[in-house]
Amino acid sequence: MLETALTELKSLMGAQAAWFRLLEGESMVIVQQIGLSRDFLRERTSVPKDDSFERGFRIKSRWR
């Protein structure tokens, strides 16, 4: 189901890639992705939860 949602999101946004991360302790870890390069995955599969690059991609939610 997550792969289907990412495929739709990627298409809707006209993006080259889409990914979903889960919080694991103090890190965010990619659990599903479509279109990311091997280099990106090697370097950024797990990032600190306050990573500035990832913050730029967060969807604002009123439930946070």
Image (tube, helix red, strand yellow):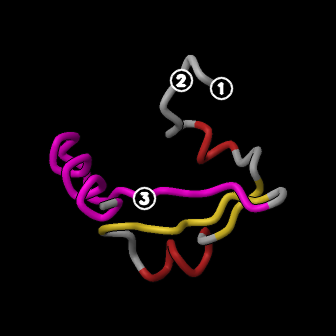
Residue position marked by numbered label 3 in the rendering: 19
The residue furthest right is 26
Vertical arrangement, residue 23 with respect to residue 39, above or below: above
Residue 42 at what x, y percent from top left?
57, 81
The verdict on residue 38 being magenta is no
Vertical arrangement, residue 44 with respect to residue 50, above or below: below
Q: Quick one: label 3 or label 1, which is nearer the N terminus? A: 3
**Foreground: 10 or 2?**
2
Vertical arrangement, residue 58 with respect to residue 21, above or below: above
**Foreground: 64 or 46?**
64
The verdict on residue 21 being magenta is yes
In the image, what residue type sits under mark 1? Arg
Residue position marked by numbered label 2 in the rendering: 61
What residue is drawn where x is 50% and y is 72%? 40
User: Which mark, residue 64?
Assistant: 1
What residue is drawn where x is 22% and y is 40%? 13
